[in-house]
Amino acid sequence: MFGRPFVIAFVLCAALGSAATAAPRVRMGVGGGLHLARLTDQSDFLNPKYRPAWSAGLALDAPLGSRLSLGSGVRYVEYGERIVFTLSDGSGGVIGRFYNHDVYRYVAVPLRLRYHPKGRSGLFVAAGPEVSYLTAVWSELRFERPVALIFEQGPSSSERLAWLRRWNFALAGGIGWELPVAGHAVTAGVQYTHGLTDLTRSPELERQTRAIETLFAIYW
């Protein structure tokens, strides 16, 4: 499903694991979370809303001092959107509605500088870039009329990918809390991720990723 980017991510995970073994202070872990995601659109016609999505992957935390650390890793993350088009007659009656649902699937490598004002445990703030690669796009289209509901599969993933830029660059910032648990460290936080790359190849349309994320991780 993921092809070459998945292999690259796997190799990177192995390298991160080796780094963690070589440097005992570097912590490896697993994490993920749920978030609200969308793609921006320049027109008022589409007006896509935030929709539920998720992420999961390996996490790395490298101390840079008593109050600073560098967080990274490899994760799978989704962005998506649902858009509704309503068709009306001259009197305001509804003829039908089109529902379009798209899911954009990425393999991403984040890099977050974390500041711990009270040491390793407790509150921290984090900010930094994230580079991701679009591996697939899932799409569904359905048309609803007063007496019928018709489902159609949208363009294939390969067709959608041909219209899009595969690499995405984003900036993220957030706040979290770290708690020691049974010799491990558990973190929970919230961050906003702001895509900077125009995903489309069209000069007439610009679309970028947005996400409000809740993130959880455990480090050993």
Image (tube, grey):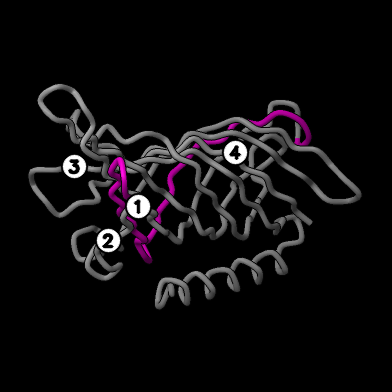
Q: How many other residues sit within 10 Å of disc 1, few (<14), some (14-19) or many (≥20)? A: some
What's the magenta region?
120-149
Answer with mark 1 or mark 2, whichever residue precedes in sequence: 1
Q: Mark 2 = which residue?
A: 154
- Look at 75% across and 55% down and name the residue there: 25
Three-letter residue code for mark 2: Gly
> Which residue occupies 26% across, 64% down?
161
- Cα distance, mark 1 to mark 2? 9 Å
Residues at circles 1 and 2 in contact by the CB criterion of under 8 Å: yes
Quadrant for the N terminus in the image: bottom left
Query: Left or right: 89 with respect to 167?
Result: left
- Tell whether position 32 is magenta: no
Residue farthest toward the top in the current orientation of the protein: 91
Which residue is drawn at the image coordinates 27% and 46% (left, top)? Answer: 197
Between label 2 and label 3, give the one nearer the viewer. Answer: 2
Residue 91: % across, % down: 14, 22
Q: Earlier in the sequence, mark 3 or mark 4?
A: 3
Of circles 1 and 2, the one toward us is 2
Q: In this rendering, is residue 35 above or below 76?
A: above
Return the residue at label 4: 214
Q: Secondary structure at mark 2?
A: loop
Q: CA distance from mark 3 to mark 1?
A: 16 Å
Q: Please name the residue that numbered disc 1 is placed on.
A: 102
Q: Which mark is residue 206?
A: 3
The reply to whether discs 3 and 4 touch (Cβ–Cβ < 8 Å) is: no
User: Which numbered disc, 3 or 1, marks the residue closer to the eye?
Assistant: 1
Callout 3 amino acid: Glu
Q: Is residue 138 magenta?
A: yes
The mark nearer the N terminus, 4 or 2, is 2
